[in-house]
Amino acid sequence: MTYIELPLKNLDEMSEETCFLNDVLKEKKLAVVLGPPGSGKSSILEKYYRENPNDSKFITVREFLRSKFKLEKHIKVLLLDGLDEYRSASNVDKISVTMDLADKISELEVDNTVLSCRELDWYGEADISALRDAIGVNASAYQILPLSEDLQIKFAQLYKINNERFFIKKFTPYGFLENPQLFRMTVSAN
């Protein structure tokens, strides 16, 4: 599978600068990747894992919390996908899910942890406090940015669309092409 690098914006900073997951991991011990459905949250984590299989682990929050998870000692980066999906499926208080997650993360010896969550299911300061209280470091939240025109062209080339500029011009007014999943669905429908 081919992955396109998706830009992130640090929600803690007023700067308009963008970064990528590799940049985040150089500076932050604990990061949260936020975005709407289909924006590429899982893909960003999977891309990192596929490029760094020897020192990272990709696992869903559900698997991490429900299994007797043992992390190999050589793993430096833990990639936890789908906090929102586990929250919606569990019958426990939504903040206690974050506290349980933080407690389990705090028991591990990893350099970095990245957590993905839909932005509307992220409880902001309540989640950050729960993570900080158990792990002892602040979580930094990053939002996946909508696909720029340049990235839309890369996606069009990836999907082998003839006359990609015409395709982009045709569908841009509908807002489908700013989201990777909607972009893919638009390609499939045409």
Image: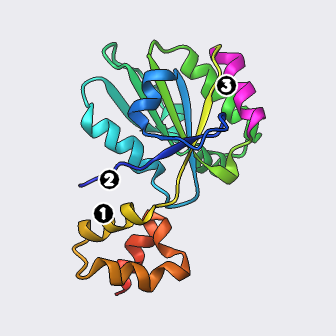
Q: Position of residue 81 (x, y in %)?
A: 49, 42
- For disc 2, the marked residue is 4
Q: Is residue 96 magenta?
A: no
Which is more toward the observer, 78 or 184? 184
- The reply to whether discs 1 and 2 touch (Cβ–Cβ < 8 Å) is yes
Task: Using residue 36 as the reference point, say whether residue 167 is left or right of it.
Answer: left
**With respect to residue 75, does 82 lie above or below?**
below
Residue 154: x %, y % from top left? 30, 63
Q: Which residues are magenta?
A: 124-135
**Location of mark 1 (residue):** 154
Q: Earlier in the sequence, mark 1 or mark 3?
A: 3
Q: Residues within 10 Å of mark 3 (few under 14, many from 20)?
A: many
Q: Which dot, 1 or 2, sits closer to the camera?
A: 1
* Element type at mark 1: helix
Residue 131: numbered disc: 3
Residue 86 locus on image (x, y percent): 59, 45
